[in-house]
Amino acid sequence: MHDDTADLPPTRDECRALLATLTGEVAAIKTRIAAADLERQRRRGRVDPFEFRQWRAALSDRQRQIERITRHMSALPSPREALKDQLIEVLRADYDDDAWRAALDKAHLRLSQRREMA
């Protein structure tokens, strides 16, 4: 089975940086299209259809990449979740099974009491 996220950044910060780059590329492509259209109007001619198709394909490709990265980023753990996972991993090593089960029971009890109060 193919992992379609293997080529995507592993962190939210890296995703944000890539999104910024892609957004800049989208803006540059749109600027080239607009400039070509202004030049076409100036000379009362036509835009090269091959070049225009290439620009549109590049624009669509970048927009698909932005959508894919945005979906991937929403699936990544938040910084708080990542810290929680690391904290559990660190603390779990210090507890035997009975102590860990007791700590989980206590945490569940506190959570249910908070919900009742809300």
Image: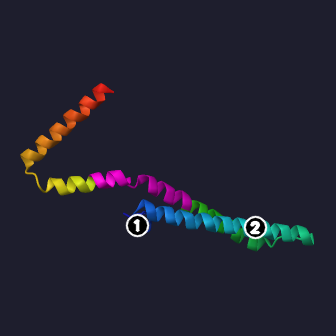
- 93 relative to 67 in the view: left or right: left
Structural crowding at the residue carrying mark 1, measured as other residues with C-alpha within 10 Å and reported as few (<14), some (14–19) or many (≥20): few
Give, as a three-letter code, the residue at label 1.
Answer: Ala
- 1 relative to 51 in the view: left or right: left
* Placement of 10 over or under 48, stated as above or below: above
**Residue 114, position as x, y percentages in the image:** 28, 31
**Residue 71, position as x, y percentages in the image:** 48, 54
Give, as a three-letter code, the residue at label 2.
Answer: Ile
**Residue 109, position as x, y percentages in the image:** 19, 33
Q: Residue at x 63, y 68 (%)?
A: 25
Mark 1 residue element: loop
- 13 relative to 50 in the view: left or right: left
Residue 33: numbered disc: 2
Q: Earlier in the sequence, mark 2 or mark 1?
A: 1
Structural crowding at the residue carrying mark 2, measured as other residues with C-alpha within 10 Å and reported as few (<14), some (14–19) or many (≥20): some
Q: Which residues are magenta?
A: 66-84
Q: Residue at x 64, y 65 (%)?
A: 26
**Residue 69, position as x, y percentages in the image:** 50, 60
How far apart in space, not on screen, are marks 2 and 1 (Cα)? 33 Å
Q: Residue at x 41, y 53 (%)?
A: 75
- 33 relative to 63 in the view: left or right: right
Residue 92: numbered disc: none
Q: How many marks?
A: 2
| Residue situated in front as seen by the camera: 112 or 22 | 112
Residue where numbered disc 1 is placed: 6
* Placement of 94 over or under 42, stated as above or below: above
The answer to which image quadrant residue 111 occupies is top left
